[in-house]
C-alpha cells in the first residue's frame, strides 16, 4: 500500500483530501501539521485527522525555526512582495515542506501531498521545496485533479462523508494563519470592488473602532534583528506576539491588494500582519539612518528580487543564499532604536537614533550651527551636470 505524507491544516481542503486519497490512491495517509503560530489545538487536530481516516498524525512546533531561519532573513532583506505583502504564507511553505520531507523519510513514505489549488502560488512553493530536498518523492496535488469545481461542492462532499469542517456556504473564507500574518481569500472577497466585510478579519480592529488615543512603541534592533520593546529585552517570538496584539488593537497591518500571482493571473488578496507591518516599517527607518545612500538604493533593488524569490518558491536556491550573504553584510550597522506611533490603522515612524547614525545635524541644519560649505556646491553641480551640458550642446546642433 502506498504511504503518503499530507500537509494537513484541518481546513476544508485537507480535511476531505484524506478521504479522497484513501479512495483514489488506496493509500495510508500520514497527516503532518506544523505549528507556525496559528494557535491550533494539536489534540483536536489529531482527533479530527484520525477520525477522518489518517493512519498517523504528526504535530511539530516550528515557531522558533520559522522566526530564526525564515522571518528574520526576510525582515533584514526588507522583503515585501510588490512593496506591500510581508509574505507570511510564502515564508512558511518551504519550512513546512522541509519538515514533511523529514517525516516522509522517517516513515519510508512514497509520496508527499498538499492541498493547494492549480492556480495558486503555494503549489509552486511546496513542490519546488520537495524537488530541491527530496526529488525521489512523488508529489500529489489532489485539488488540481479532483472532481470538485467549487468550495460548495467540497462542503457537500464533507457532509456526505461526515467530515467535520469549520466553513459554511454563507462564510466560505479560506484563511491561512501564522504568527507573521494571516491571508484571507474566497467568498465576497473575490470581487475587487467589494469592501471586505468585518467578519473577514481575524486579529485587527476596524480603524474606525480602534482607540482614539495612539500608542507609542520603541523598538530596538541589533544588526537588523529586533531585540527589545520599550527598553525591555525580549525574544523575537514575544516581540512578534506583543506587536500583533498592540498593532491589531489599532487596526494596523490590514492589507487589501491586487496581487500578481506567479501563475500569471491577478488576484485580490486580504492580509492581516500587524507585527510584520510594524517591524518592517521600523527596520526600514533605521536603515535610512545608518546605511550610506548608494548602498541603501542598491539594497532596495536586492529587496525586490529577494521578495520575488521567496514569493516564487526559490527559498532553497543558491540565488537566495547568495543574497542573504549580501543582506547580512548590510546589517552591520543596523542597530538602534525606532519610535513608532500606532493610530487608526497607521504605523508612523516618529523617532530614530543609533550610535552608527550617518545623520549630522550640523550638516543638515538651516540654523547658525550650519557647517556645510555652500560655496562648494557650484563646482559640484558643474562637474555633476557636465554630461547634460554636452548633451544640450549636441542637441542644439540639430
Image (cartoon, rainbow, N blue to C red):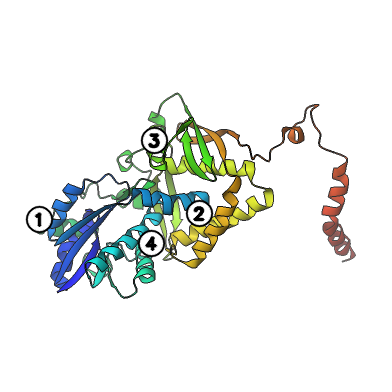
Residue 90 visible in image: yes
Which is more N-terminal, label 3 or label 2? 2
Label total for image = 4
Disc sitting over residue 242 in the figure:
3
Residue 183 visible in rendering:
no
Q: Nearer the viewer, mark 2 or mark 3?
A: 3
Q: Earlier in the sequence, mark 1 or mark 3?
A: 1
Q: CA distance from mark 2 to mark 1?
A: 42 Å
Q: Indicate which label's residue lies in the foreground, 4 or 3.
A: 3
Residues at marks 4 and 2 touching, judged by CB atoms closer than 8 Å: no
Percent from the top left, x then y, of residue 394? 87, 64
Task: Mark 4 and mark 3 in contact? Answer it, CB < 8 Å.
Answer: no
| Residue on which the image places disc 2 | 82
The disc label shown at residue 121, or none: 4
Query: Up-down: is 220 above or below 155?
Result: above
Mark 4, secondary structure of its residue: loop
Q: Residue at x 62, y 43 (%)?
A: 288
Q: CA distance from mark 4 to mark 1?
A: 30 Å
Q: Nearer the viewer, residue 68 or 204?
A: 68
Q: Which mark is residue 162?
A: 1
Tell me: 291 left or right of 322: right
Q: How packed is label 1: few (under 14 Cα within 10 Å), some, or many (20 or more)?
A: few
Q: Earlier in the sequence, mark 2 or mark 1?
A: 2
Q: Secondary structure at mark 1?
A: loop
Amino acid at each position: 500500500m502506498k504511504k503518503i505524507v499530507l500537509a494537513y491544516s484541518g481546513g476544508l481542503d485537507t480535511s476531505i483530501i484524506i478521504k479522497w486519497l484513501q479512495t483514489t490512491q488506496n493509500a495510508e495517509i500520514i497527516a503532518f501539521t506544523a505549528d507556525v503560530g496559528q494557535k491550533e489545538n494539536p489534540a483536536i487536530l489529531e482527533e479530527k485527522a484520525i477520525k477522518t481516516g489518517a493512519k498517523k498524525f504528526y504535530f511539530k512546533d516550528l515557531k522558533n525555526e520559522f522566526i530564526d531561519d525564515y522571518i528574520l532573513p526576510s525582515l533584514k532583506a526588507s522583503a515585501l512582495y510588490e512593496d506591500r505583502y510581508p509574505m507570511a504564507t510564502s515564508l512558511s511553505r518551504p519550512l513546512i515542506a522541509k519538515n514533511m520531507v523529514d517525516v516522509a523519510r522517517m516513515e519510508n513514505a512514497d509520496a508527499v501531498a498538499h492541498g493547494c489549488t492549480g492556480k495558486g502560488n503555494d503549489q509552486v512553493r511546496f513542490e519546488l521545496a520537495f524537488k530541491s530536498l527530496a526529488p525521489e518523492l512523488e508529489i500529489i496535488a489532489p485539488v488540481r485533479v479532483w472532481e470538485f469545481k467549487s468550495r460548495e461542492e467540497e462542503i457537500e462532499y464533507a457532509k456526505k462523508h461526515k467530515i467535520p469542517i469549520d466553513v459554511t456556504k454563507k462564510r466560505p473564507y479560506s484563511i491561512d494563519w501564522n504568527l507573521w500574518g494571516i491571508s484571507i481569500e474566497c467568498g465576497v472577497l473575490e470581487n475587487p470592488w467589494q469592501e471586505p466585510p468585518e467578519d473577514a478579519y481575524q486579529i485587527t480592529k476596524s480603524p474606525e473602532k480602534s482607540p482614539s488615543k495612539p500608542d507609542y512603541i520603541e523598538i530596538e534592533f541589533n544588526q537588523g534583528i529586533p531585540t527589545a520593546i520599550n527598553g525591555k529585552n525580549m525574544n523575537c517570538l514575544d516581540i512578534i506576539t506583543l506587536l500583533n496584539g498592540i498593532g491589531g488593537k489599532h487596526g494596523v497591518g490590514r492589507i487589501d491588494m491586487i496581487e500578481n500571482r506567479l501563475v500569471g493571473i491577478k488576484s485580490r488578496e486580504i492580509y492581516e500582519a500587524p507585527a510584520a507591518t510594524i517591524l518592517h516599517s521600523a527596520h526600514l527607518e533605521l536603515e535610512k539612518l545608518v546605511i550610506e545612500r548608494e548602498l541603501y538604493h542598491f539594497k532596495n533593488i536586492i529587496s525586490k528580487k529577494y521578495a520575488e524569490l521567496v514569493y516564487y518558491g526559490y527559498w532553497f536556491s543558491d540565488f537566495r543564499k547568495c543574497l542573504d550573504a549580501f543582506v547580512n553584510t548590510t546589517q552591520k550597522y543596523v542597530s538602534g532604536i525606532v519610535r513608532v506611533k500606532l493610530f487608526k490603522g497607521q504605523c508612523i515612524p516618529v523617532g530614530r537614533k543609533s550610535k552608527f547614525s550617518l545623520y549630522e545635524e550640523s550638516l543638515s541644519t538651516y540654523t547658525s550651527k550650519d557647517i556645510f560649505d555652500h560655496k562648494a556646491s557650484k563646482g559640484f553641480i558643474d562637474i555633476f551636470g557636465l554630461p547634460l551640458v554636452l548633451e544640450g550642446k549636441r542637441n542644439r546642433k540639430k
